[in-house]
């Protein structure tokens, strides 16, 4: 039987999450589980809100999969908490877009202490109103009323995925949804996870010498090692000035995760 340890993230994956603010996971769920969950969702007459796991208890098989546990342990520590809030989002056919927003209260800091898990029980195609995320925006504060005026953003990523995919996203990551132009409902279950203890040591597959690699000025954001990911990653092509500031934030987040940082807020 597979264990959580077998599914821990590596240094590059953690660095990518620090930079981009999301990680896509396709766990090898039991045959028929996604279909069972989707069928039960189709049969619901109303939205049970936080009680969605009571209405569809098979969702716990998703949350308890060792690959899910490996990702959560890597980013939140082994004592992470599945919080009580969860929600079924059903994007109806012919429904419009949802404006950009952040789920948090716009408090930027260097802690990685909670994030979302967005589970999709069916395939999501571009015309089904996919969730749209903007990588790297978890460190960029914007009031919701200001974001309401934004349309397409350079570097935005539609979460077009296979059935069973879970998108783990930083709680502050900018996101919204596209319009559903298809004749099908688009289902997504949102879960919320929380750290309960600060890291004293890394909780993923970590190499202590991982940042010793030389800075690769030739490949820059094409490099795949953590040092260069943290240094050069620029998923939405921000200005040199903003990129310089974000590099400092990323290193503070990394130091916090490896147990060397202190909890400190980032001035807005």
Image (cartoon, grey):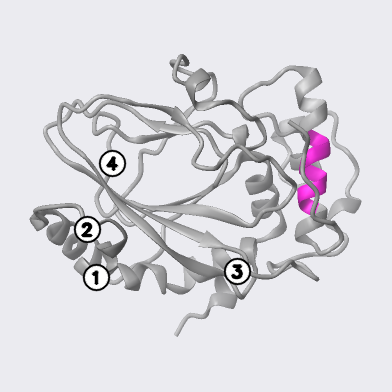
The image quarter in which residue 259 lies: bottom right
Q: Residue at x 36, y 57 (%)?
A: 86
Between the C-alphas of marks 4 and 3, the distance is 27 Å
Tell me the element at label 2. loop
Q: Which residues are magenta?
A: 247-254
Please tell me the numbered disc located at residue 54.
1
Name the spot of residue 191 as percent of width and height, x first.
41, 57
Whether residue 180 is visible, yes or no, is: yes
**Majority secondary structure in the magenta region:** helix
According to the picture, the residue beneath numbered tag 2 turns out to be 48
Q: Furthest-bottom residue in view?
A: 1
Q: Residue at x 64, y 53 (%)?
A: 13
Between the C-alphas of marks 4 and 1, the distance is 24 Å
According to the picture, the residue beneath numbered tag 3 turns out to be 73
Q: Are marks 4 and 1 in contact (CB under 8 Å)?
A: no
Q: Sort mark 2 into few (<14), some (14-19) or many (20+) by Cα contacts within 10 Å.
A: some
Q: Residue at x 51, y 36 (%)?
A: 102
Please tell me the numbered disc located at residue 124.
4
Of marks 4 and 1, the one in the foreground: 1
Tag 3 or tag 4, which sits nearer the N-term? Answer: 3
Residue closer to the observer: 115 or 3: 115
Whether residue 32 is visible, yes or no, is: no
Tag 2 or tag 3, which sits nearer the N-term? Answer: 2
């Amino acid at each position: 039987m597979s264990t959580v340890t077998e599914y821990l993230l590596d240094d590059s994956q953690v660095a990518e999450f620090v930079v981009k603010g999301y990680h896509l996971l396709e766990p090898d769920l039991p045959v028929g589980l996604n279909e069972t969950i989707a069928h039960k969702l189709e049969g619901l007459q109303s939205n049970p809100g936080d009680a969605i796991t009571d209405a569809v208890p098979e969702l716990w098989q998703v949350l308890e999969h060792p690959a899910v546990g490996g990702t959560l342990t890597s980013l939140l520590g082994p004592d992470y908490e599945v919080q009580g809030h969860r929600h079924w989002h059903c994007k109806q056919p012919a429904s419009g877009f949802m404006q950009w927003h952040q789920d948090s209260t716009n408090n930027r800091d260097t802690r990685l202490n909670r994030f979302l898990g967005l589970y999709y029980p069916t395939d999501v195609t571009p015309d089904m109103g996919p969730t749209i995320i903007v990588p790297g925006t978890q460190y960029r504060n914007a009031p919701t009323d200001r974001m309401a005026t934004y349309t397409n953003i350079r570097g935005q990523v539609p979460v077009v995925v296979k059935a069973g995919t879970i998108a783990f996203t930083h709680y502050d990551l900018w996101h919204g949804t596209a319009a559903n132009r298809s004749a099908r409902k688009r289902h997504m279950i949102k879960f919320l996870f929380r750290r309960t203890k600060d890291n004293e040591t890394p909780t993923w597959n970590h190499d202590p010498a991982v940042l010793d690699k030389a800075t690769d000025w030739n490949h820059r954001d094409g490099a795949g090692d953590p040092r260069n990911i943290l240094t050069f990653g620029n998923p939405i092509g921000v200005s040199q000035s903003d990129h310089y500031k974000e590099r400092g934030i990323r290193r503070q987040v990394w130091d916090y995760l490896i147990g060397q940082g202190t909890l400190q807020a980032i001035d807005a």
